[in-house]
């Protein structure tokens, strides 16, 4: 008979749920049908994969190994099937696009929307990825193009300035400094700060800290968050103030006050980056569209 995709999917679901009823519901099968599929799989593998009792299901040691080895395989096969079906419908393929918080809160959604309308035969596989991880993923070609914070000087990549923001202060709406229309970063030196975590926000974090030190102080970091929503939530809760990009203006949010920082003229660039040797036809199509979109939008970005 051989092991089929249905066997792998069934075992993956049961291995994660460890409950025949819930796994069967998730697979839209009856419990007897799921039991039959798992029995076929065990017969094919030749060893027990599960220990069944009247109350619970457990993986055997062999079952744990089989689950770890086949989970990614089932995902890859499912992705291959879906891509094949899309190809049969006339889709040319997938373009893997990564983005950061700053990018997706700026102009990027408009570009992606317009590209989807113009090129319905290309599927954009979108994934959130911090800048530091995008730089690695580009070189490994696990993504085709990334929209990241800052510039990239690596000789193996090419880049295109896509968007930019300005430094702003984000304060609780009730904060005394929120009564001011404009602030200076130096005026925040006695405040508690909320920062993005070092792992995900390392580059922007380093830039902000450098600007603070230029003004004679090191920010007193009270709390950290992994994403923008977490940063804003902590600010609203009164944990501190934050420095962010002006793209926050595209995110209406109650409970915070956003003020320009007059002593910071440095812009915050969002750059499209791709591997120089990537000859993908889909990437070429996307880059051509992106350059035309930037020119039409009146951007000062270079070629």
Image (tube, rainbow, N blue to C red):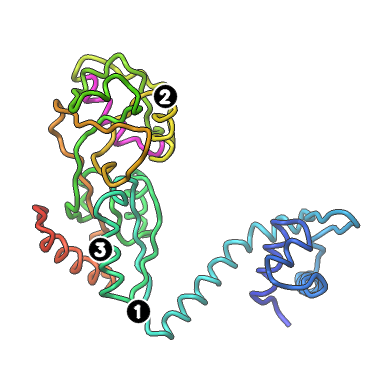
Q: Is residue 99 magenta?
A: no
Q: CA distance from mark 1 to mark 3?
A: 20 Å
User: What numbered label is drawn on residue 92?
Assistant: 1
User: N-terminal of the two: label 2 or label 1?
Assistant: 1
Identify the residue shown where x is 10% and y is 61%.
Answer: 295
Q: Which residues are magenta?
A: 199-213
Quarter of the figure with residue 207: top left
Q: Position of residue 213 (x, y in %)?
A: 23, 19
Q: Judge left or right: residue 173 versus residue 114.
A: right
* Front residue (pair 182, 10): 182
Identify the residue shown where x is 30% and y is 55%.
Answer: 146
Most frequent secondary structure within the magenta stretch: helix
- Categorize mark 1 by other alpha carbons within 10 Å: few (<14), some (14-19), many (20+): some
Q: Classify mark 3: helix, strand or loop.
A: loop
- Categorize mark 3 by other alpha carbons within 10 Å: few (<14), some (14-19), many (20+): few
Q: Is residue 204 magenta?
A: yes
Residue highlighted by disc 2: 238
């Amino acid at each position: 008979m051989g092991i089929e995709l249905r066997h792998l999917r069934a075992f993956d679901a049961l291995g994660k749920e460890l409950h025949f009823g819930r796994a069967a519901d998730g697979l839209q099968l009856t419990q007897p049908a799921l039991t039959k599929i798992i029995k076929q799989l065990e017969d094919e593998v030749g060893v027990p994969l599960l220990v069944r009792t009247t109350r619970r299901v457990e993986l055997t040691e062999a079952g744990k190994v089989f689950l770890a080895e086949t989970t990614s395989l089932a995902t890859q096969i499912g992705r291959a099937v879906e891509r094949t079906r899309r190809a049969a419908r006339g889709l040319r393929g997938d373009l893997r696009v990564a983005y950061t918080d700053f990018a997706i809160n700026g102009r990027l959604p408009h570009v992606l929307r317009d590209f989807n309308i113009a090129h319905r035969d290309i599927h954009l596989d979108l994934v959130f990825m911090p800048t530091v991880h995008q730089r690695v993923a580009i070189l490994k070609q696990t993504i085709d193009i990334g929209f990241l914070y800052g510039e990239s000087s690596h000789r193996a990549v090419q880049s295109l300035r896509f968007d930019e923001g300005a430094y702003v202060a984000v304060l609780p709406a009730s904060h005394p400094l929120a009564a001011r229309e404009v602030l200076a970063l130096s005026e925040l030196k006695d405040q508690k700060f909320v920062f993005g975590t070092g792992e995900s926000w390392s580059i922007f974090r380093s830039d902000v800290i450098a600007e603070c030190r230029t003004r004679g102080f090191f920010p007193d970091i009270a709390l950290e968050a992994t994403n923008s929503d977490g940063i804003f939530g902590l600010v609203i809760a009164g944990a501190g103030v934050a420095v962010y990009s002006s793209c926050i203006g595209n995110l209406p949010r109650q409970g915070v006050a956003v003020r320009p920082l007059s002593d910071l003229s440095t812009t915050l660039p969002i750059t499209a980056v791709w591997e120089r040797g990537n000859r993908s036809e889909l990437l070429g199509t996307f880059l051509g569209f992106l350059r035309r979109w930037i020119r039409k939008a009146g951007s000062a970005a270079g070629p």
